[in-house]
Image: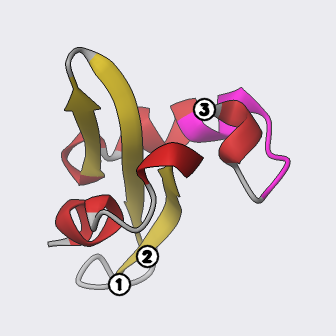
Amino acid sequence: MRAELAEPYSVFTYYYFIKLWPDLTIMAYLDNQLIGCIIGSLDKDNPRKAYIAMLVVLKEFRRHKVGKKLFD
């Protein structure tokens, strides 16, 4: 899945987001294969604001609304 990422962040950056906001991390699986992931975070100054830190779907599963389902 790393090859699908648009940003060249270290894997530790994503671990940071997942550790701080595990409730804002959602993964999509198909037959026990990870096919997509959305990782969010909260604004440190205003915890009522959140943003998407990463949204990724494997290339072969794009255009199947996986990203939309992760966002919903």
Q: Which residue is mark 2?
A: 43
Residue displayed at 51% across by 45% down: 60
In depth, the one of 38 and 14 nearer the eye is 38
Q: Amino acid at mark 1?
A: Asn
Q: Which residue is outermost to the top? A: 32
In depth, the one of 5 and 16 nearer the eye is 5
Q: Which mark is residue 46?
A: 1
Q: How is the image coloured?
A: secondary structure
Q: Which mark is residue 12?
A: none
Mark 1 vs 2: CB contact within 8 A: yes
Mark 3: secondary structure: loop
Mark 1: secondary structure: loop
Mark before the other along the chain sequence, 1 or 3? 3
Q: Which residue is mark 3?
A: 1
Labels in figure, total: 3
Q: Is residue 48 left or right of residue 12?
A: left
Mark 2 vs 3: CB contact within 8 A: no
Residue displayed at 45% across by 59% down: 62
